């Protein structure tokens, strides 16, 4: 897994909280820094793709492992 | 950058129906939209400083129930309170945000909340009962923003 600058554990949270928390966390990063997100909401997979497309922050990685979802988003 | 705009009319004041305007409003704001929500009629309940949103299965045969309850029984005193507590407990268990939290997130994201002055008067609500961040206006106020919005939703 690539390096990241900040981690957000959104486990147990449901739509739209993972997205809203991620947005807040990204606001504290500077351009080019990477946020690592852990989520358990299966809807988050499509939602983070859509979030990244609409905000221009790059979704570098999206994977599932043992019922959890992991995302790497680079701030634009 | 010219932002996209989302206008929502929120007309319902039950616990379940309070979610769509606040979820969509907060999420759109996170995606970079400028958002305005116009609260009218029962939707005004969502703006109360002291929230007391309830849910009931009466008139809603689609509501999933843990066990079948005859409609006559659903109307008994205390049933609405019980259903509301059960719904809140279920939401908490599933990691669904509570209404206060979503509302705070909307305010934080600068979602503009307009209360319909006509229905505030109709129900004898005072401005002090509603959130201090609320603005007041009428149909023309709504159209000023809605007319230049990319998405308009009636909930």
Image: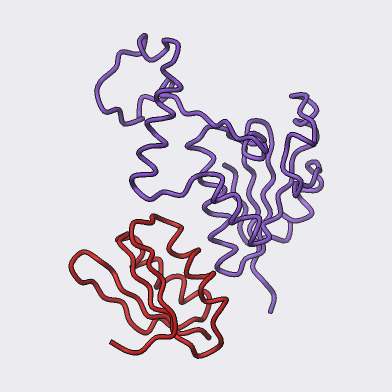
Q: How many numbered discs, if any? A: 0
Compared with residue A15, is residue B21 higher up or lower down, i.e. above or below? above
Q: Residue at x 56, y 66 (%)?
A: B30
Q: Residue at x 64, y 60 (%)?
A: B108
In this rendering, position of residue B100 left or right of residue B121: left
Drawing shade for chain B = purple
In which quadrant will I find the N terminus of chain B?
Answer: bottom right
In which quadrant of the rendered view does residue B58 lie? Answer: top left
Colour scheme shown: by chain
Q: In the rendering, at what x and y percent does residue B32 appear?
A: 60, 70
Drawing shade for chain A = red
Of all residues, the one furthest to the left in this rendering is A66
Q: Which residue is more in the foreground, B72 or A17?
A: A17
Q: In the rendering, at what x and y percent does residue B146 appear?
A: 71, 54
Q: In the rendering, at what x and y percent does residue A5 appear?
A: 44, 85
In this rendering, position of residue B151 left or right of residue B76: right
Q: In the rendering, at what x and y percent does residue B131 appear?
A: 72, 43
In this rendering, position of residue A70 left or right of residue B3: left
In which quadrant will I find the C terminus of chain B?
Answer: top right
Compared with residue B121, is residue A44 higher up or lower down, i.e. above or below? below
In this rendering, position of residue A39 left or right of residue B1: left
Q: Residue at x 38, y 73 (%)?
A: A37
């Amino acid at each position: 897994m690539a390096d990241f600058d900040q981690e957000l554990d959104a486990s147990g949270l449901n739509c739209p909280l993972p997205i809203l928390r991620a947005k807040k966390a990204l606001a504290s990063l500077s351009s080019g820094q990477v946020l690592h997100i852990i989520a358990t909401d299966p809807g988050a997979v499509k939602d983070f793709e859509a979030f990244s497309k609409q905000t221009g922050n790059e979704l570098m990685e999206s994977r599932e492992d043992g019922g959890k979802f992991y995302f790497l988003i680079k701030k634009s | 950058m010219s932002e996209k705009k989302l206008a929502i009319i929120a007309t319902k004041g039950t616990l379940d129906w309070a979610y769509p305007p606040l979820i969509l409003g907060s999420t759109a704001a996170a995606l970079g939209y400028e958002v305005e929500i116009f609260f009218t009629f029962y939707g005004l309940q969502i703006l109360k400083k002291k929230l007391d949103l309830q849910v009931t299965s009466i008139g809603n045969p689609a509501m999933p129930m843990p066990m079948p309850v005859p409609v006559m029984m659903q109307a008994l005193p205390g049933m609405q309170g019980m259903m509301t507590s059960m719904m809140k407990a279920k939401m908490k268990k599933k990691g669904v945000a509570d209404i206060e939290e979503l509302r705070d997130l909307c305010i934080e994201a600068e979602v503009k909340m307009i209360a319909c002055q006509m229905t505030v008067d109709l129900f004898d609500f005072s401005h002090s009962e509603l959130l201090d961040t609320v603005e007041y206006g009428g149909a023309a106020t709504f159209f000023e923003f809605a007319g230049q919005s990319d998405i308009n939703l009636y909930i």
